[in-house]
Amino acid sequence: MKNNPSLKGLCIAVVAFVFAFGIYFLFLAKKNYYVVDNPTPNTYYYKINEGEEGVIAAGQTVPLHLSQGRNSIKVYDQNRKFLYDSAFEVSKIRGLINIAHQDYYINDQYYGYNLKKDSLLLALDKTMIDGTSYYGGAKHFNKLYSEDFYYNVDEDYDKIVKNIQKVESRSKIFRKQDYLNYYKEYYKF
């Protein structure tokens, strides 16, 4: 085979393309998964869809596999005494099972150029938490299952979002105390 510069260029381009996608999928791609979360000091046992029994300790977040569609869960306390069973519908690619029915808050963080964060927050609804008003319109959640967020309870917001031409938002679900800590650290009124 002759020394063909076009063929060499094509081979180099294909290798660079495969390498770039490999780097993206190994290190940069956001993983989609479901979690069971327990912010309480109690331990719980659970069975999802009559599968294997799982255990979640105090303050733990456990990733798990869920099927799209209807799922069921049975929950037991630390003495394996039956607490409740329920069903929930899964339609998105990430979600959180609130096994102890505790308070969570789904907050939107805004990104973009020329973003005036304080005036934007003042224009949004207020959320009442323990008798105190918080700006930003975080949505309260204490039901069994939610999937109305982008970042899960064990993920952080992106520090920088590039190539945004307009103001956009990303939502994250927080445990109650984590949300209060985030609010005090991030917002300076």
Image (cartoon, grey):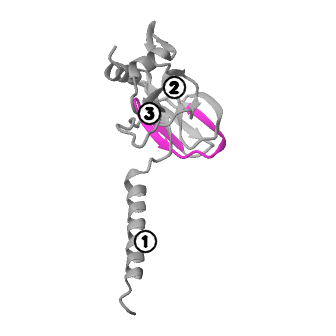
Is residue 72 rendered magenta in the image?
yes
Q: Element at badge 1?
A: helix
Q: Earlier in the sequence, mark 3 or mark 1?
A: 1
Which of discs 2 and 1 lies nearer the camera? The answer is 1
- Can you say whether 24 is above or below 126 in the image? below
Q: Residue at x 42, y 32 (%)?
A: 111
Please tell me which residue lies in front, 136 or 85: 136
User: In this view of the protein, can residue 167 be seen by the observer?
Assistant: yes
Whole-Å distance between the Cαs marked 2 and 1?
A: 51 Å
Q: In screen coordinates, is 69 left or right of 65?
A: right
Q: State the image quarter where residue 14 is shown.
A: bottom left
Residue receiving disc 2? 100
Left-right relation of 110 to 142: left
| First in residue order: circle 2 vs circle 1 | 1
Residue 66 locus on image (x, y percent):
58, 45
Magenta: predominant secondary structure element? strand
Q: Kindly indicate the quadrant of the structure image that contains residue 142.
A: top right
**Residue 150: assigned label:** none
For label 1, the crowd category at 10 Å Cα-Cα, with few meaning under 14, some 14 to 19 and many 20 or more, is few
Magenta part of the protein: which range? Answer: 53-75
The residue under label 3 is 153
Q: Earlier in the sequence, mark 3 or mark 2?
A: 2
Q: Which residue is mark 1?
A: 14
| Distance from the alpha carbon under mark 3 to that under mark 2 | 15 Å
- The percent position of residue 157, horizontal first and vertical second, equals 39, 35
Give the CA distance from mark 3 to mark 1: 38 Å
Residue at the (36%, 24%) spot, across then down: 182
Q: Residues within 10 Å of mark 2 (few under 14, many from 20)?
A: some
Front disc: 3 or 1: 1
